[in-house]
Image (spheres, rainbow, N blue to C red):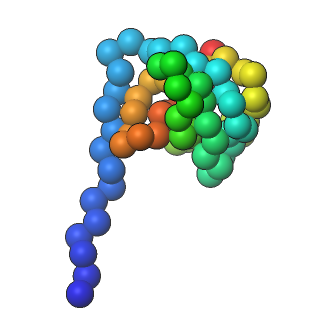
Amino acid sequence: MLFNRRKPKFEMLPEPERGVVDEAIGPNLAGRVKAFSSIWPAEIYQPDSQKVHLHPGQSVFVVAIDNITLLVVPM
């Protein structure tokens, strides 16, 4: 039996939130970000960019949330 899998929809934040990379994030590589007083799974929110790498300690903006995964961009 096949299930109809929908691509998860994400919610854009009304204003970006500041965060700090805790575990490296890269193209097709999820990591972790400290934001909202906690550590969250995170991915880069730049579907067209394959060259962005975020390193631990680097500041980012959280721009959206997909389930429990934060979508971030470099500051």
Name the residue nearer the viewer: 73 or 22.
22
Q: Can residue 64 be seen from the camera position used here?
A: yes
Instruction: Name the image quarter holding residue 57.
Output: top right
- The reply, left or right, for residue 67 in relation to residue 2 is right
Residue 68 position in % (x across, y down) = 41, 40
- The reply, left or right, for residue 18 in relation to residue 59 is left
- The reply, left or right, for residue 60 in relation to residue 15 is right
Residue 42 versus residue 5 in the image, above or below: above
Quarter of the image where the C terminus is located = top right
Q: Residue at x 68, y 42 (%)?
A: 26
Residue 12 position in % (x across, y down) = 34, 27
Q: Can residue 61 be seen from the camera position used here?
A: no
Hey, which residue is sitting farthest front in the picture?
Answer: 38
Residue 6 position in % (x across, y down) = 27, 59
Name the residue nearer the viewer: 43 or 35.
35
| Number of marks in picture | 0
Quarter of the image where the N terminus is located = bottom left
Residue 51 versus residue 7 in the image, above or below: above
Residue 39 position in % (x across, y down) = 56, 31
Residue 5 versus residue 37 in the image, above or below: below
Hey, which residue is sitting farthest bottom in the picture?
Answer: 1
Q: Residue at x 25, y 82 (%)?
A: 2
Q: Residue at x 36, y 43 (%)?
A: 67
